[in-house]
């Protein structure tokens, strides 16, 4: 074990020494330009030398772990390597210094790029039309649920319920609820949708069924044809959560599986950097009958000109200002263009190969519930460790000491002590072998070591209950608390 | 697929002959035969292709723009770009493992701290998608604070984009948005109209300062007292708060805005970064991720995500919002920007914006057939110009002179015929203003 993260004591910016600043008081009225009753008295923002600011953030960056540092097998998040050329392209002024309300004649390149990205996503998703507006996967789901609602309303129907499997990402039920739906969670059978239970669950009140395929266990929903039929026979729509699309590109598509609405997570499948939590982008694709409901504006291509069409009387309106996360769209476009159709198919092949290889190496040391063949990710159970008093959280924390980010843990909820691993296609066999070695080694380590892990990271385990109790969310609060002690 | 030796060995370990066998579980009836997309290209070819496609875009540097309306062209110091480009930051994700993610966590805490100072609010979350979705979430949160209500009041002086997005969010909770008029002389909230529309079933009121047309709201205290216990939601341009009284001082329950002004380029309007703050008594009703301060086992200061029981990954359909991926990297950019420019720099930049606005408005006002600013009020960096010429004609003329003029208001605000919304920031030199003024003088 050779990994050691940098350990710095980095004071808050507010606690640092200030640079020399003008001694005369600042006149916020700007010589009477702003009335006195509108100006603020104080502004507590530190005046720091640039040198110290750069040092501050570089030291902080050394206490952060990204894909550039090493394996980041966070299940369902598709933490693959992000090609650097994509970052370079978005730094061009012809991407960064254009305004969304510019005359369309002056942003023809941007409109063309977005239009072509829509076409590529239609092909990959097997859908007929795409909107790029949603800013993230959950925003895509939110958009999709509004499309569901608008679709039923346009047919004079008021349906009240959305069904999701119990293995669904938390965003699915949350998005459905935000659009006013009651959510029914369907218990799985053998890790997959129970086709019979689904038949019994759907009714004239069912607005949609949300599904990700392969599901969050990494299993391909083998009954997907029956599922689609059941949902459609009930007059409901079938929604595809694109979080796991990295497994199936070129092999099948949501459209081919008869899904009506699909969201894509560009930051996952198409390798745009996750940015410490965002930005992402969550375009939504639909089959032809739903196209008229998509958000405005639509990008129109006529002759050699691109223009914007706001005149869409059936549209659900807007889900985000302007066009969506353009800089993310540009990166995804570049990624798709670089790979081409065959390249994207190879991406999925390698993602699935890596996942199965790693699963093969680990399944005997842990437990692999529900079937053998997985797609891009797999879920182990940490139950075998329980007998010696070690929990999945301990295992995850110990992995950090070996220089690996931890997998997603305790999700999906139907697996006891779940460890959800998604290695992605960009990791070499060498890395997978090293990760498997570490996992096996940890499984044999004494419980005490695991309970005290991590030891090699910038901080040891945190008192998270204290954070919730103290509720210090800013320097302001912190200062107040110190003041009262 | 071309199989490398490594892949071959991996297949052997799986006792498989081909990669295809890994996809045997997909029913034949839903299989497709590859993707009909053009063949891939090399990095060099990609750069050539994209340069050629994107070079037809007219960037603000070569083609001065006087657009604002929610997205602003500001200077970004080089150090900000250096900080934001660090691979450890940009290629990480939501800090689910705080021990190995302190860098991003502390940066988010610093962002929250800066924004809490600027807005004078108790809590600011670590970002929403943009100001429009932040407003949508604020409507839903007001509904939770008020414990129900079927209507939410919004000022008419807000951006049409924001209004449309807020409407979509409100629809999910069966809330209808009702507009409150603005005073046609000052552009500020029409208090009589507000009083009239403030009924029992109203769950809050949203207004902006400066509002969409530029005027800074001077009646905030009166609005607060008219609203009584009902939630007051205030939209701000956070850069203006370098000079202006913060909404925390006049009793806002929720503050929203867009922190794009701090270190994020315009990027055709995305990504942006939704600012969202509230009073501490409402924190459990708040959407989005919040970073809190704590200690580790050894008693060292450390940071982690907190109050997660509000969020979708824990609470599922009962969460306060569905948001998961947010705009963390841009929050980092904002924290880096504010620490690089500092209090003195930020005030200077803000002062320059006001100075440029006043100078440009005065110059445009002196051109025959133009009036600026249209509203009698204090402005920050944006103002309405009205004209005796048709807006479309002015816009076309400016375009022909290589200038992107203001945002034409006629369509969304028929009452402001032949008007456009102009923004000017520290990015405009005197030469840029000269060019605009000269072009406006040439409109016939």
Image (spheres, rainbow, N blue to C red):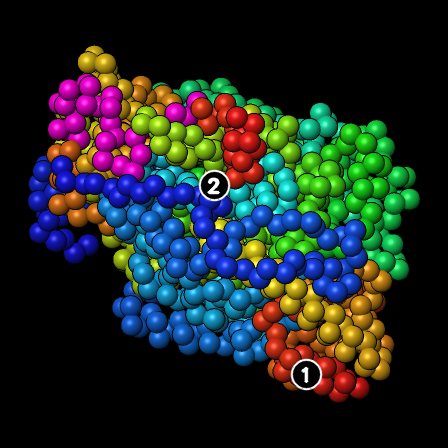
Residue at 41% from the left image edge and 35% from the top image edge: B303
Q: Quadrant of residue A10?
A: top left
Q: Are marks 1 and 2 in contact (CB under 8 Å)?
A: no
Instruction: Give x and y (percent) for residue A410.
Output: 35, 25
B4, above or below B26, in the image: below
Which numbered disc covers residue A48? Answer: none
Which numbered disc covers residue B434? Answer: 1
Residue at 61% from the left image edge and 31% from the top image edge: B280
Give the labeled residue for mark 2.
B109
Residue at 67% from the left image edge and 56% from the top image edge: B243
Considering only order in the chain, which callout, 2 or 1, is on the residue closer to the N terminus? 2
Q: Is residue A229 visible?
A: no
Write the start and end of the magenta stretch as one range: A439-465
The chain carrying label 1 is B
The chain carrying label 2 is B
B170, above or below B70, in the image: above
Does the magenta segment cover residue A224? no
Q: Quadrant of the C terminus of chain B?
A: bottom right
Q: Quadrant of residue A157?
A: top right
Instruction: Give x and y (percent) for residue B319.
Output: 54, 28
Q: Residues within 10 Å of mark 1 (few under 14, many from 20)?
A: few
| Residue B12 horizontal side relative to residue A53, left or right | left
Does the magenta segment cover residue A458? yes
Instruction: Give x and y (percent) for residue B264.
Output: 51, 59
Instruction: Give x and y (percent) for residue A407.
Output: 29, 34
Q: Nearer the viewer, residue B244 or A366?
A: B244
- What element does badge 1 sit on? helix
Q: Nearer the viewer, residue A321 or A307?
A: A321
Residue closest to the far top: A387
Kindly indicate whether the residues beneath marks 1 and 2 are on one polypeptide chain: yes
Question: Label 1, label 2: how many angstroms apart (C-alpha)?
Answer: 43 Å
């Amino acid at each position: 074990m050779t990994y050691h993260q940098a350990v710095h004591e980095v004071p808050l910016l507010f606690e640092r020494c200030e640079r020399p600043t003008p001694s005369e008081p600042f006149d916020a009225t700007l010589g009477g330009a702003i009335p006195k009753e509108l100006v603020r008295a104080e502004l507590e923002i530190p005046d720091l030398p640039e040198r110290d600011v750069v040092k501050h953030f570089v030291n902080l960056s050394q206490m952060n772990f990204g894909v550039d540092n090493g394996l980041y097998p966070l299940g369902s998040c598709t933490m693959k390597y992000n090609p650097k050329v994509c970052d370079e392209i978005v730094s061009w002024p012809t991407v960064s210094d254009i305004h969304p309300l510019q005359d369309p004649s002056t942003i023809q390149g941007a409109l063309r790029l977005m239009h072509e990205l829509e076409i590529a996503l239609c092909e990959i998703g097997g859908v007929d039309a795409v909107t790029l507006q949603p800013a993230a996967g959950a925003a895509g789901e939110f958009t999709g649920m509004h499309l569901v609602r608008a679709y039923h309303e346009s047919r004079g129907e008021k349906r009240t319920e959305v069904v999701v499997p119990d293995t669904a990402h938390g965003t699915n039920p949350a998005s459905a609820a935000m659009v006013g739906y009651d959510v029914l969670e369907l218990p799985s059978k053998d890790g997959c949708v129970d086709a019979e239970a689904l038949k019994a669950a759907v009714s004239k009140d069912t607005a949609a069924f949300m599904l990700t395929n392969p599901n969050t266990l990494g299993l391909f929903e083998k009954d997907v044809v029956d599922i689609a039929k059941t949902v459609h026979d009930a007059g409901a729509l079938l929604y595809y959560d694109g979080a796991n699309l990295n497994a199936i590109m070129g092999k099948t598509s949501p459209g081919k599986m008869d899904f009506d609405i699909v969201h894509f997570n560009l930051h996952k499948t198409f390798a745009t950097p996750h940015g410490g939590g965002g930005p992402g982008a969550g375009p939504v694709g639909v089959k032809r009958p739903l196209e008229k409901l998509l958000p405005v504006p639509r990008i129109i291509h006529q002759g050699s000109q691109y223009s914007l069409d706001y005149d869409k009387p059936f549209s659900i309106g807007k889900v985000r200002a302007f066009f969506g996360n353009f800089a993310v769209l540009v990166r995804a476009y570049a990624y798709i263009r670089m790979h081409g159709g065959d390249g994207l198919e190879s991406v999925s092949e390698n993602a699935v190969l890596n996942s199965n290889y790693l699963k093969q190496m680990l399944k005997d040391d842990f437990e692999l519930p529900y079937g053998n063949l997985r797609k891009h990710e797999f879920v182990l159970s940490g139950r075998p460790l329980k007998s010696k008093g070690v929990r999945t959280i301990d295992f995850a924390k110990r992995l950090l000491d070996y220089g690996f980010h931890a997998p997603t843990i305790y999700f999906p909820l139907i697996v006891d002590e779940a460890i959800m691993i998604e290695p992605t296609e960009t990791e070499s066999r060498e890395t997978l072998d090293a990760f498997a070695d570490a996992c096996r080694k940890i499984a044999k380590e004494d419980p005490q070591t695991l309970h005290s892990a991590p030891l090699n990271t910038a901080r040891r385990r945190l008192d998270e209950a204290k954070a919730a109790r103290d509720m210090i969310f800013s320097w302001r609060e912190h200062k107040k608390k110190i003041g009262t002690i | 697929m071309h199989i490398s030796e490594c892949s071959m060995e991996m297949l052997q370990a799986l006792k498989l002959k081909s990669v295809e066998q890994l996809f045997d579980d997909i029913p034949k009836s839903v299989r497709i035969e590859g993707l009909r997309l053009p063949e891939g290209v090399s990095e060099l070819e990609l750069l050539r292709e994209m340069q050629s496609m994107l070079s037809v875009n007219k960037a603000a540097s070569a083609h001065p723009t006087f657009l604002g309306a929610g997205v602003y062209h500001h200077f970004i110091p080089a150090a900000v770009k250096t900080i934001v480009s660090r691979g450890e930051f940009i290629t990480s994700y939501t800090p689910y493992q705080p021990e190995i993610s302190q860098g991003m966590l502390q940066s988010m805490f610093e962002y929250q701290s800066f924004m809490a100072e600027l807005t004078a609010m108790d809590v600011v979350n670590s970002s929403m998608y943009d100001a429009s979705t932040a407003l949508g979430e604020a409507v839903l949160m007001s509904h939770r604070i008020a414990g129900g209500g079927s209507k939410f009041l919004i000022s008419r002086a807000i951006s049409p984009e924001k209004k449309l997005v807020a409407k979509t969010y409100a629809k999910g909770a069966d809330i209808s948005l009702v507009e409150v008029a603005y005073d046609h002389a000052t552009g500020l909230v029409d208090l009589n109209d507000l009083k009239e529309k403030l009924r029992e079933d109203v769950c809050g009121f949203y207004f902006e300062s400066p509002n969409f047309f530029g005027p800074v709201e001077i009646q905030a205290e009166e609005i607060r007292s008219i609203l009584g216990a009902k939630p007051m939601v205030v939209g701000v341009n956070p850069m203006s708060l370098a000079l202006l009284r913060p909404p925390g001082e006049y009793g806002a329950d929720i503050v929203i805005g867009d922190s794009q002004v701090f270190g994020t380029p315009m990027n055709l309007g995305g990504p942006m970064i939704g600012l969202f703050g509230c009073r501490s008594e409402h924190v459990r009703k708040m959407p989005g991720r919040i970073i809190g301060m704590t200690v580790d086992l050894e008693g060292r200061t450390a940071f982690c995500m907190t109050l997660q029981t509000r969020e979708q990954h824990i609470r599922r359909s009962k969460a306060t919002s569905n948001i998961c991926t947010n705009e963390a990297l841009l929050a980092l950019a904002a924290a880096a920007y504010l620490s690089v420019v500092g209090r003195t720099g930020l005030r200077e930049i803000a002062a320059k914006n006001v100075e440029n606005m006043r100078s440009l408005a005065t110059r445009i006002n002196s051109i025959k057939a133009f009036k600026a600013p249209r509203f009698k009020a204090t402005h920050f960096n944006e103002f309405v110009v009205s004209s005796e010429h048709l807006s479309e004609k002015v816009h076309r003329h400016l375009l022909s002179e290589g200038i992107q003029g203001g945002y034409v208001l006629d369509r969304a605000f028929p009452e402001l015929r032949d008007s456009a919304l102009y923004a000017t920031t520290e990015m405009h030199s005197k030469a840029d203003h000269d060019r605009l003024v000269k072009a406006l003088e040439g409109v016939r």
